[in-house]
Amino acid sequence: MHRLMVDRSSAQPGTGRFLLRAAERRVAATGRALVRLDCLADNARLNTYYLNAGYRVVGHKAGKPQPGGAPKSFTLLEKTCEPAARAERLWPG
């Protein structure tokens, strides 16, 4: 998953969790066993959010170059897709 963000100042509470779960279901529906994402390593609040959503830390990427900016470090996370969600299809047939 990449670039999924919510502006907390204008979104209703629970919007981020709703979108995260919808994205997880879409990944699972493709038959994949894992959902993977990353977030800024120094964003403790976001790292905790993902841990509380069932993700686990599987690595770190330090000093990744950024276009037009200073390098940034990322926490790499993954979560096992729910078996029932893997069985769903995005379209009939």
Image (spheres, rainbow, N blue to C red):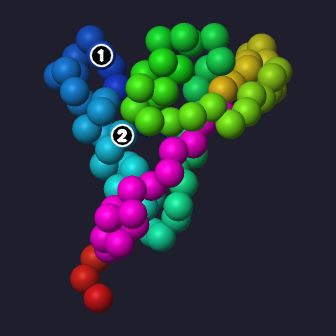
- Image quarter where the C terminus lies is bottom left
Residue 49 left/right relative to 69: left
The disc label shown at residue 76, or none: none
Q: Which residues are magenta?
A: 76-89
Name the quadrant containing residue 56: top right
Residue 66 visible in the displayed image: no
The disc at residue 8 is 1
Compared with 81, 20 (above or below) is: above
**Label located before the other in sequence (2 or 1):** 1
Q: How many neighbours does mark 1 have within 10 angstroms: few (below 14), some (14-19), or many (20 or more)?
A: few
- Residue 41 in percent (x, y) is at 65, 18
Q: Is residue 53 magenta?
A: no
Q: Which structural element holds mark 1?
A: loop
Q: Amino acid at mark 2?
A: Leu
- Taking the spot 50% from the left edge, 36% from the top edge, the residue there is 55
Q: Could you tell me residue 23's position as x and y percent? A: 38, 49
Residue 20 is marked as 2
Looking at the image, residue 85 lies above or below residue 9: below
Percent of width and height locating residue 67: 74, 27
